């Protein structure tokens, strides 16, 4: 496949390295010192199951627009922060509309796919999530990643409303599996994204506040009740949105967190580096919807205020 990775940070570089190692033609879109390092020295990815050190085709956004057409790619994978989605779609709108290449979003939050579908149509939109992976740029051109690094993906918003994409999704899954990326197709990717939001909303803000890993938070007698409360507030909002989450989903996500390796969340890493954090895509998204529905989310209000 010909694959475009937009947002070649820790997560994007890991999956891109896996795919390039499997023989796919991958183009990485990056910026700044990281882009310069990728162009001059190649990409290094350190993971317990892969040690990647190869030259890669890395470009900036302007070069992408002038040197490539959207039809030069079979799949576009978006891995940048959720707060950049709207502005990226605005800049890339005309370029994206000149072809039919699907976009797979591997981003945090539940607002990215609706924005993408509004620009290119739901028939080209694949919802997705990266599960049980930690990936960070430790220095320009060098990425450290850990975890099984699974991918869950599906037609947006679900298979029932976008049935004709099943064959295309199965081909992508086949290539991902061959590249040692554990991949599952979901019939209801919108539900999967809300279930992941249980985890992101439950631990990401608290990790940035406390400096603790995911495992430390859910095993703490002090912080585990707050994680649970943050998750319960997601359930309240999801049900108002017509997404059926229950207490069983909360218990399942807590059990998963307790079985994960101890991972530093992306929000904690960004906070430590003084970078913008995805607060609006996680807590902010919940608080905005809560205002619409007249709900009170005290735990989300508290962590949002502390991080703001």
Image (cartoon, rainbow, N blue to C red):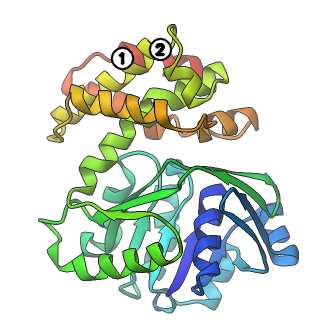
For label 2, the residue is 302
Name the residue at 16% across, 33% down: 240
Name the residue at 32% across, 69% down: 125
- Give the camera-side residue of 182 and 101: 182
Q: Earlier in the sequence, mark 2 or mark 1?
A: 1
Q: Position of residue 86 (x, y in %)?
A: 46, 57
Name the residue at 21% across, 56% down: 188
For label 1, the residue is 229
The reply to whether the C-beta atoms of the residues labelled 2 and 1 are less than 8 Å apart is: no
Q: Secondary structure at mark 2?
A: helix
Q: Quadrant of the C terminus?
A: top right
Q: In the displayed image of the protein, which residue is found farthest to the top?
A: 222
Q: Position of residue 72 (x, y in %)?
A: 51, 91
- Give the camera-side residue of 98 and 141: 141
CA separation, marks 2 and 1?
11 Å
Q: Position of residue 251 (x, y in %)?
A: 31, 27
């Amino acid at each position: 496949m010909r694959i475009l990775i937009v947002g070649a940070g820790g997560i994007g570089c890991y999956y891109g390295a896996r795919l390039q190692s499997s023989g796919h033609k991958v183009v990485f879109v990056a910026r700044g010192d990281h882009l310069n390092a990728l162009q001059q020295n190649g990409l290094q990815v350190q993971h317990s199951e892969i040690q990647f050190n190869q030259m890669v085709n890395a470009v900036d956004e302007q070069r992408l627009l002038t040197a490539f057409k959207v039809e030069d790619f079979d799949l576009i994978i978006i891995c940048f922060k959720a707060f950049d989605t709207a502005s990226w779609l605005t800049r890339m709108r005309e370029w994206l509309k000149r072809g039919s290449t699907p976009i797979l979003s591997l981003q945090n939050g539940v607002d990215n796919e609706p924005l993408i579908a509004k620009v290119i149509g739901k028939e080209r939109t694949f919802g997705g999530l990266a599960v049980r992976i930690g990936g960070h740029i430790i220095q320009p051109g060098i990425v450290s990643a850990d975890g099984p690094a699974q991918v869950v993906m599906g037609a947006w918003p679900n298979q029932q409303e976008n049935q004709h994409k099943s064959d295309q999704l199965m081909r992508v899954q086949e290539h991902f599996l061959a590249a040692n990326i554990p991949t599952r197709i979901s019939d209801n990717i919108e539900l999967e994204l809300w279930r992941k939001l249980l985890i992101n909303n439950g631990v990401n803000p608290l990790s940035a506040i406390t400096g603790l890993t995911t495992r430390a938070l859910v095993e703490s007698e002090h912080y585990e009740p707050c994680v649970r409360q943050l998750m319960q507030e997601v359930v309240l909002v999801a049900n108002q949105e017509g997404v059926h989450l229950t207490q069983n989903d909360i218990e399942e996500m807590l059990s998963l967190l307790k079985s994960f390796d101890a991972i530093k969340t992306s929000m904690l890493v960004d906070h430590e580096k003084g970078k913008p954090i995805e607060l609006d895509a996680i807590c902010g998204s919940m608080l905005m919807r809560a205002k619409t529905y007249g709900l009170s989310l005290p735990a989300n209000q508290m962590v949002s205020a502390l991080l703001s």
